[in-house]
Image: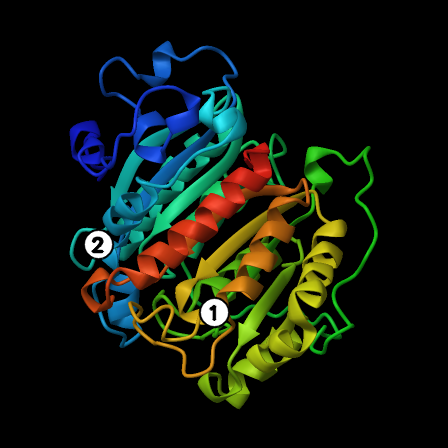
Amino acid sequence: MTTTPAEMAEHWSGRHDGDGPEHARWHQLVQVMGLHGHDEADEPAAEPHVALLGFRSEEGVRRNQGRVGAAEGPVALRRALAPLALHGPLARGEVGLHDLGDAVTLGEELEAGQAAAAELTARALDRPGSRLTVVLGGGHETAWSSYLGLVGSRKGPGAGTGTGTGAGTGAGTGTDTRAGTGTGPGTGAAAGAADPGTTSAERRWGVLNLDAHFDLRDEPQPTSGTPFAQMAEAEEAAERTLHYAVLGIAEPSNTGALFATARRLGVQWWTDEQCLAAGADGIRDFVAQFAADLDILYLTIDLDVLPAAVAPGVSAPAAYGVPLPLIAAAVQAAASSGKLALLDVVELNPALDIEGRTARAAARLIDDAVRTVVGGSA
């Protein structure tokens, strides 16, 4: 199920200082597809744009024994983005902002909701002229639908070869036994640029997760805590290796079993303490090294990576967390890599937010990513 254009349009409103690029804000230039003639069928071919869509889902959080409310995240994120000022090609309308609407999980039908979100994500990635696709979550079950959308799109690792995964919903952890991790400052990820002659069948993709949790749980059904275990299993089935890195892991919030799974899968990670010790420059280096050997980068931001004072509106607020400027450094490094195709922002629970702090922090990170990708700075 998806929401209607009229429902989307009502969330894009805010202060109006005047017309023209010097006064531009998100709410003035976002085009809701299907509303007032802004129909995908009528768009100019290959018009440069950033595609936005939402996934209104919290069933994965409920299954993971968390505090529900994340289904309202996409609405709150749009409202937080709406008043932000635009600059450069975004303000001039040279790069559009296109809202494709929301996929919705109805009741406990998570798998059906994820399938709808995956279809919408793949469509966004495949639209001519797409510079970046931004998914507004939703619980972190959003990551599984983002993955399905990516591998089912023409940007996916098996595009045009029949090797994409596309449909599995299992929550197992897989059996990939890569050795080694990148767990301490200075270790980073494998370096080396991708071969410019790489074919679609060889295309390497990776996922960078900004999160206090590995989300590698082995459960009998998918939850917000299983998406990367599901990805590992799906990639193994497709005879590929999951390239997965995490910044912000909270040791007290991840059991020994989860660390063992991460090691077995060759996950690269830094803890929240290691991020603080490394600082912004160290984080930028970590991201740059991880992205260097990839053709496509998928970035997922779980807002519970931020300190509770900055992000109270999540199911599991962080007692320690990684400060916003360091998370912003990771986002900007990913966006400046030239590899970022897909971004999702998850776990915002507006009912738990205080003064909109979490939504505003999330909006700033989304804006940072979009501006960096399209060159939209003042």
From this view, report whether residue 113 is shown above or below residue 161.
Answer: below
Question: Residue at position x 36%, y 48% from top?
Answer: 136
Query: Of the residues shown, which amino acid type is indicated by label 2?
Result: Glu
Report x, y in % for residue 91.
Answer: 45, 26
**Between marks 1 and 2, how big is the CA–CA gap?**
28 Å
| Image quarter of the C terminus | top right
Q: Are marks 1 and 2 in contact (CB under 8 Å)?
A: no
Reading the image, the residue beneath label 2 is: 72
79 horizontally vs 271: left or right = left
Query: In the image, what residue type sits under mark 1?
Result: Gly
Of residues 357 and 199, the one drawn nearer to the viewer in this rendering: 357
Quarter of the view holding residue 4: top left
Q: Secondary structure at mark 2?
A: helix
Residue 375 location (% of width, % of height): 59, 33
Which residue was labeled with disc 1? Answer: 172
Residue at image position (36%, 72%) is: 220
Where residue 75 appears, as percent x and y from the top left, is: 24, 47
Q: Is residue 362 visible?
A: yes
Residue in front for this viewpoint, 83 or 288: 83
The location of residue 59, given as percent across then percent down, is 24, 62
Asked which secondary structure carries label 1, the reply is loop
